[in-house]
Amino acid sequence: MEKTLLLIKPDAVQRNLIGKILSIIENEGFEIIDLEMENISREKAEAFYSVHKDRHFFSGLVDYIVSGKTVIVLLQRDDAIKYLRQIVGRTNPINAVNGTIRNMFGQTLRRNSVHASDSKKSADYEIQIFFKENT
């Protein structure tokens, strides 16, 4: 079994999409190991997005993720990272395949409703930020 991280971002939380998104995830065979809702601190946000720290959009990412509550979900299943990325869809909702979470619920490139770890290395790092005891 492989672990991965899903964030239900502030835009989706504000639009009451938590249940719909979690239902899709569970129906695809994921087990929810842990789940928290929090206002992510700027410090955590900067650590989370540190891979982008030298890019022009870094401050906008941080400002957005700290703008409201986020649901942080630790998931598990076989081939979890790859499979979750398929279900979530491409980063920009306009380019996401029909039926993916970002296609159905995403509004813009930044307000795309969810984040999913993109590799084993990223998942390990991101999970440690939010769920230290589960790493």
Image: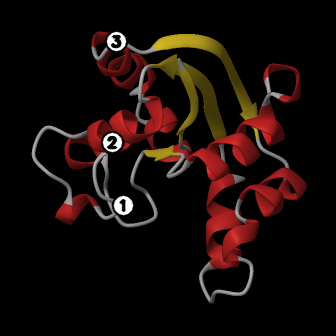
Q: Would residue 79 be seen by someone viewing this image from the given angle?
A: yes
Helix, strand or loop at disc 1? loop
Q: Is residue 25 left or right of residue 116?
A: left
User: Residue at (63%, 37%) from the top-left corner?
Assistant: 70
Check whether the beta carbons of the residues at disc 2 and disc 3 lie within 8 A of each other. Answer: no
Q: Is residue 44 left or right of residue 116?
A: right
Q: Along the polypeptide, which appears first: circle 2 or circle 3?
A: 3
Q: Nearer the viewer, mark 2 or mark 3?
A: 3
Q: Is residue 84 left or right of residue 104?
A: right
Residue linked to disc 3? 29
Q: Which residue, as the protein is rendered here, is positioned at the far left?
A: 98
Q: Is residue 2 left or right of residue 128?
A: left
Percent position of residue 111, x then y: 43, 57
Q: Residues within 10 Å of mark 3 (few under 14, many from 20)?
A: some
User: Residue at (60%, 25%) from the top-left corner?
Assistant: 73
Helix, strand or loop at disc 2? helix
Residue 88: numbered disc: 2
**Type of amino acid at the residue the image marks with label 2:** Val
Residue linked to disc 1? 91
Separation (CA) of disc 1 from disc 3:
22 Å
